[in-house]
Image (cartoon, rainbow, N blue to C red):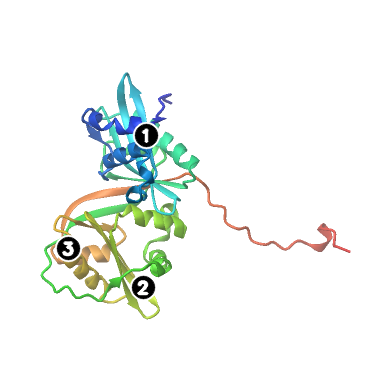
């Protein structure tokens, strides 16, 4: 096993990485605009994060594998909403392929995130990536396959059956997640509501909408600057069509729709409406802490324990 180690970078060191990124030309994972976090990491060293306008900057972890005066590889990760999960936003390496550096970076990221109280580390990479084996060796297991589709221009009216989601819908959306996502995916991705908040934050949605049916939420749509995501209850007739109508009229021209592999019905409907495939991405997770469920109460024969007098 390689003895290569990645070390956490100070905020000032992280900020000075920006001009060196051209030397780290190979991006290992699906681009998540992680380079911008290098600047925000540097802000922590200046005290600017005390200003209200910048107070919402996420906590970040920046790690580097040194090579002389430069770097062989750099990893950037950010804390997701709720604190249970962190997402690796960028892994850059100087070579075309460097499994040892990738494994060292991800292993060190897991240790740093666990030290900060995180339970799960997430990252996304392109299907068929030459770096997939190194990521698996570092403990990242695929939990969701994401298909990206270009959204056709919408010519429908702006009216919709959806309403803007509020904080009071959080539990209802989590129930929809539990109903619409297979259990084997949820077990790896988000077994608790706190971790679902982290996954939802990783979608980078600026706006959320829900569709009500009777006493529950039948569909949810999250729309961001670059991507849109959907969840639809299987028994909600017409909800998928209404969700795609919303996506087509509320997303930007350059945004894409992300459809998970288990959402085959939505994918077939989208293709029939003119959505074109852009690529496939793998969302992977590494569990950093074990969940300890409450143990069931077990009856004990009376003769094995002394009874109180």
Q: Nearer the viewer, mark 1 or mark 3?
A: 1
**Residue 177, picture quadrant:** bottom left
The residue wearing badge 1 is 11
Residues marked 3 and 2 touching at CB (< 8 Å): no
Image location of residue 306, percent across then percent down: 85, 59
Q: CA distance from mark 1 to mark 3?
A: 45 Å
Answer with mark 2 or mark 1, whichever residue precedes in sequence: 1
The residue wearing badge 3 is 271
Image location of residue 62, percent across then percent down: 36, 36
Circle 1: element type: helix
The residue wearing badge 2 is 217
Give the label on residue 148, or none. Answer: none
Q: Residue, x 17% and y 55% (percent of image)?
A: 277
Q: Residue, x 26% and y 66% (percent of image)?
A: 265
Q: CA distance from mark 2 to mark 1?
A: 43 Å
Residue 32 appears left or right of 252? right
Between residues 118 and 134, which one lies in front from this camera angle? 118
Between residues 203 and 269, which one lies in front from this camera angle? 203
Circle 2: element type: strand
């Amino acid at each position: 096993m390689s003895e290569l180690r990645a070390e956490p970078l100070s905020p000032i060191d992280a900020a000075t990485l920006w001009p060196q990124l051209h030397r780290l030309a190979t991006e290992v994972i699906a681009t998540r605009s992680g380079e911008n976090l290098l600047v925000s990491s540097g802000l922590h060293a200046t005290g600017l994060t005390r200003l209200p306008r910048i107070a919402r900057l996420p906590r970040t972890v920046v790690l580097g594998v040194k090579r002389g005066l430069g770097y062989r590889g750099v990893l950037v990760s950010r804390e997701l909403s709720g604190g249970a999960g962190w997402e690796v936003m960028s892994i850059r390496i100087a070579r075309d392929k460097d499994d040892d550096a990738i494994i060292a970076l991800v292993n060190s990221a897991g240790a740093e995130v666990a030290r900060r109280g995180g339970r799960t580390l997430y990252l996304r990479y392109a299907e068929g990536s030459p770096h997939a084996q190194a990521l698996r060796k570092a403990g990242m297991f695929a939990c969701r396959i994401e298909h990206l589709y270009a959204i056709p221009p919408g010519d429908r009216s702006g009216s919709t059956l959806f309403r803007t989601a509020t904080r009071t819908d959080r539990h209802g959306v989590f129930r929809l997640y539990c109903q619409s996502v297979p259990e084997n995916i949820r077990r790896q991705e988000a077994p608790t509501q706190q971790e679902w908040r982290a996954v939802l934050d990783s979608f980078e949605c600026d706006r959320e909408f829900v569709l009500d049916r009777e006493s529950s939420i039948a569909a949810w749509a999250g729309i961001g600057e670059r991507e849109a995501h959907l969840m639809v209850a299987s028994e909600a007739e017409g909800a998928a069509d209404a969700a795609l109508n919303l996506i087509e009229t509320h997303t930007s021209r350059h945004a894409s729709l992300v459809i998970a592999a288990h959402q085959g019905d939505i994918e077939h409907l989208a293709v029939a409406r003119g959505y074109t495939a852009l690529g496939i991405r793998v969302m992977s997770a590494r569990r950093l802490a074990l969940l300890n469920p409450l143990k069931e109460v077990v009856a004990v024969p009376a003769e094995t324990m002394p009874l109180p007098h």
